[in-house]
Image: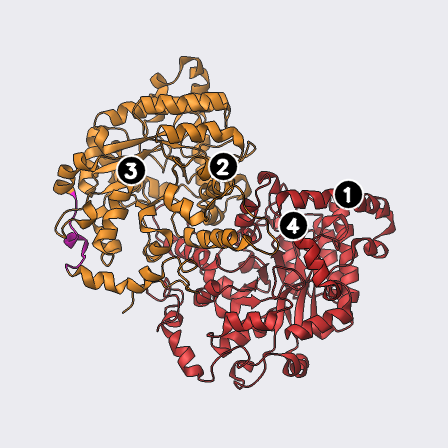
Chain colours: A orange, B red
């Protein structure tokens, strides 16, 4: 178990949130030919989509130009494996979980019919599945060149016909993909507590494919051109399915299912967990609320057993909350090749962020927890990690780890204070 | 300024979240007679509404029976002023902010056409305004008997025709009401960033009527019979308008407007504030995001100037976060006469919750902050408060306040860590 590995050992880093996608027009050979006419239409609307993104302020002309100029070569890693591995090595990243949409600035690599990060429950079922399969077929090829370094995330338009959705789960697994992304929003379709989805949860559990939502879709029609509104709640929509699955007993009925939320931070989780645990624990003998028959244990136990957070570039504030979230539930990610991520300065970024975090916990959050969730083979990755991974010393983490552990002792012992008999959380180091 | 008042002085307690409403059928004389036919229909659907609440698990038959049996006399205080003042005195509450729906268990006091806490943006505009005016007329009478002790909250179906909405703001103010409750959800109507609402914000600012959302409405059709889902997000919907107003510049255009969120806790605010401040402060020279022209200062400055939280029965976890939220932004409330509130055991509840909180801060959160926001006359209330208010000693707060202040020093000095140069929040007392 690497937790007990020596202080000197380089980190085995796995990014739980990276992105890859073909320049959109190149998806054509991967798309069933009967959808080529609709595909041409889709390509024709590209400028309109970009204009809309610019209007909302998600896209900034001046920034876009500089971004593509400064990173032209590296950005080819969005679809070119050779270039990609070079960039990952440079960042010290041994392996990655691969979500769609390499180009978050100009959407030049949008999957057919916009089923990438914008995958939405109200998508036309037929076009949605066609676009998803096109991306999934390409992605399976893409990750097959160095399978030990990539976990490909299949796009799953889950609100379609259950039999077809289940079939795609098995097809994706068979093709070498390792996880499933479902829309954060079901929009006008059945919410995720609906029993119609049980066969899909069962298939995901059986194939050991974690189900993930990723930030991207949101009710933009409500925001006008106010970017701040969008950013203020864009992380709420992908986390929302968590309590729909939890309270409807999906984790109880499908103990093998793993569910995660990607690129939505983890800052919101402690409050939500405290709130849900109190609700559940208070309801037994509670005043006004009925008991929750679908659950056999408190929400936090399901969380530790089946839920994970692809927290991407974890903020210092979030790391201070890790004993409430659960260290093993936090999966770091570089978000390569997106501009809001840490590439190409991941090594510096890691030093600024993790310098006072205990090494054992850092190993979990930077890679080992992701290896457990997504099934990476750490033995196969070990030699590469030893070659490219930064050491604790390079992250500025002191050799005297006992002192570091001690500075977090009170926060660690308090943990989830509502379960440890404390009234308050205890956040931050004690000096 | 009472902050500097002696340790011995009893507290001036103002509940920022109480509820009053007539037994529904008694609203008839306050309702325009041309709506009486629809009112009879509404009364006829009462059993159906109760059945639905029971199905979702919000209503528990056994609990309901016990509740009404144990508190029959006190619950009459929901609409009987004499009884109400007796109950407030017993709890040590000198004054209160009065929201609708006294009966949260069986909805026996629902305002006509369900425009109470369930007030929703998609309400029929004509019926909605008629029902709101019926409640507002009765409420104005109700508070007029002892005006210094009540701030009546007028129901404002804001998604209707702006001219009529503005007229109701002035009519309500004229009638003696002191605040305005708008729907938490606009549903299919214009979101609150829409300029169509500017005349309403202007009228609220001019009349010094704070605008408030209160938990109650939510997309229940999405929840099935899963109570946990409802409770997990019911506090999100009333807080949502905050970032719609903030990012669309409403607080900048209407510096006299005060906006509050009621009975939704305040645990969610520190994260939201940290998130929004970072977004705003990072955007100037930020990578991918456009600047936010509608704002002239960081979100936290608008918050401290114009936003308040009717936090009701504040949890210990929330009090630990008060230096991030802002002590002056937290308004305690008893939620009388709702079962999830502190009545009739408010004195005991206050002792359990505030025993280690500094007296000066407790005075603000238990009353003085609410007096500032809702315009209560503390001089008029002082004699009553001296008679019924609990003392710091009765709340278990030690006479050695210097030691209490010191135990919170680090948390207080860290405050909003993203503005004080600290990486982490510092929550909890130092021992």
Which SS class for mark 1?
loop
Mark 2 and mark 1: span between their CA atoms? 33 Å
Which SS class for mark 2?
loop
Q: Which is closer to the viewer, label 2 or label 1?
A: 1
Chain of the residue on which disc 3 is drawn = A
Chain of the residue on which disc 2 is drawn = A
Mark 1 and mark 4: span between their CA atoms? 19 Å
Q: Which residue is mark 4?
A: B60
Q: Nearer the viewer, residue B403 or A135?
A: B403
Q: Are marks 2 and 1 on the same chain?
A: no
Q: Position of residue B362 (x, y in %)?
A: 52, 74
Which SS class for mark 3?
helix
Q: Are marks 3 and 4 in contact (CB under 8 Å)?
A: no
Q: Position of residue B125 (x, y in %)?
A: 73, 46
Chain of the residue on which disc 4 is drawn = B
Q: Position of residue A124 (x, y in %)?
A: 51, 24
Q: Which residue is mark 1?
A: B45
Taking the magenta stretch, the answer to whether it contains residue B218 is: no
Q: Quadrant of residue B222?
A: top right
Q: Which residue is mark 3?
A: A68
Lateral position of residue B321 relative to residue B201, left or right: left
| Depicted B139 relative to depicted A244: above or below | below
Local crowd size for mark 4, using a 10 Å CA cut-off: few (<14), some (14–19), many (≥20): some
Q: Nearer the viewer, residue B206 or B34?
A: B34
Q: At 74% across and 59% down in the image, what residue appears?
A: B21
């Amino acid at each position: 178990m690497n937790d007990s590995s020596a202080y000197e050992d380089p980190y085995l880093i796995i990014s739980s949130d990276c992105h890859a996608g073909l320049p959109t027009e190149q998806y054509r050979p991967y798309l069933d030919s009967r959808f080529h006419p609709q595909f041409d239409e889709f390509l024709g609307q590209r400028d309109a989509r970009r204009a809309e993104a610019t209007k909302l302020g998600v896209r900034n002309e001046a920034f876009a130009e500089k971004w593509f100029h400064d990173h032209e070569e590296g950005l080819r890693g969005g679809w070119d494996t050779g270039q990609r591995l070079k960039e990952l090595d440079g960042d010290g990243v041994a392996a990655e979980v691969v979500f769609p949409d390499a180009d978050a600035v100009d959407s030049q690599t949008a999957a057919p019919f916009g089923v990438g990060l914008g995958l939405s429950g109200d998508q036309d079922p037929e076009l949605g599945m066609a676009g998803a399969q096109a991306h999934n077929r390409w992605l399976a090829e893409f990750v097959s060149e160095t399978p030990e370094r990539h976990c490909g995330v299949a796009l799953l338009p889950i609100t379609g016909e259950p039999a077809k959705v289940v079939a795609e789960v098995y097809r994706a697994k068979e093709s070498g993909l390792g996880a499933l992304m479902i829309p954060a929003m079901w929009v006008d379709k059945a919410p995720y507590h609906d029993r119609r989805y049980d066969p899909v949860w069962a298939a995901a559990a059986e194939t050991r494919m974690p189900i993930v939502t990723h930030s991207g879709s949101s009710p933009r029609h409500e925001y006008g051109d106010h970017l701040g509104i969008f950013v203020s709640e864009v992380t709420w929509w992908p986390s929302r399915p968590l309590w729909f699955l939890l309270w409807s007993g999906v984790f109880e009925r499908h103990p093998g299912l793993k569910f995660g939320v990607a690129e939505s931070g983890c800052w919101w989780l402690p409050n939500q967990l405290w709130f849900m645990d109190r609700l559940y624990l208070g309801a037994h003998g509670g005043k006004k609320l009925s008991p929750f028959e679908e659950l056999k244990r408190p929400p936090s136990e399901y969380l530790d057993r089946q839920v994970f957070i692809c927290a991407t570039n974890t903020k210092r504030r979030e790391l201070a909350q890790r004993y409430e979230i659960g260290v093993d539930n936090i999966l770091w990610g570089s978000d390569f090749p997106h501009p809001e991520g840490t590439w190409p300065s991941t090594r510096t970024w890691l030093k600024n962020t993790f310098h006072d975090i205990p090494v054992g916990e850092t190993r979990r959050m930077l890679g080992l927890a992701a290896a457990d969730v997504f099934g990476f083979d750490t033995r196969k990755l070990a030699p590469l990690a030893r070659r490219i991974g930064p050491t604790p010393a390079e992250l500025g983490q002191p050799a005297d780890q006992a002192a570091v552990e001690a500075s977090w002792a009170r926060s660690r012992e308090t943990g989830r204070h509502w379960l440890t008999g404390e009234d308050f959380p205890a956040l931050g180091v004690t000096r």
